[in-house]
Image (tube, helix red, strand yellow):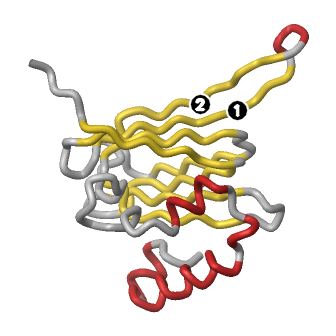
Amino acid sequence: MFILSQQRDQDPVGSFQRYREYLKRHQEEFPRGAFSLATSDWWFSLDDRRSPHDAWLERFEILEVGSGDRSAERATGVRVELLGAFHDMDLTLVYSGVSGLRLDAVAIADGHHDWRYDEFRISDEGRLIHEIEWSYLASTARWRIEADDVEYFAEPRQRAT
């Protein structure tokens, strides 16, 4: 791991430098969507409204779509909907080809609170891993999603009139 809380808290500048080097070395292995997010100039920004940093969870869905005879061939996806940090954007992540999912929640009675840190990596098997840390006054949850790729959408929040 490169830029999750343990690494950032110890060496914020060096951790990002090592992460950028990792991304560059593994560019050919990364799925297009995840690599585009990880190398963008806004994804990890504290000021860009498209960034998930400090966003709040609104919805988490596991989708299983069947195909073939009797819909017996199954494909798993995950959809994550967030309220942006400035409360003016709807942020959506859609993971396709999900093959692993781990949700560790240690203190979510009052919600996950802030999307703190995240990073994209490639597993030993060549799959995308997206690890996300949530936090309030202390850690609230940690997610690990293994998938083929991720799509991302950011739209201005529609306000009721």
Q: Quadrant of the C terminus?
A: top left
List x then y, in percent, for residue 27. Answer: 68, 71
List x then y, in percent, for residue 57. Answer: 36, 41
Can you tell which mark lies on residue 62?
2
Q: Is residue 155 left or right of residue 106?
A: left
Q: What is the quadrant of residue 116 in the picture? A: bottom left
Q: Which residue is mark 1?
A: 76
Determine whether 45 is above or below 113 in the image. Answer: below
Q: What is the quadrant of residue 32 in the picture? A: bottom right
Residue drawn at the location 32% of the way across and 38% of the way down: 155
Determine whether 54 is above or below 2 in the image. Answer: above
Determine whether 15 is above or below 115 in the image. Answer: below
Q: Residue type at mark 1? A: Thr
Q: Quadrant of the N terminus?
A: bottom right
As measured in the structure, the alpha-carbon distance from the residue carrying label 2 to the one carrying label 1 is 7 Å
Q: Is residue 113 left or right of residue 30?
A: left
Residue drawn at the location 40% of the way across and 69% of the way down: 41
The one of 85 and 39 positioned closer to us in this rendering? 39
Local SS, label 1:
strand
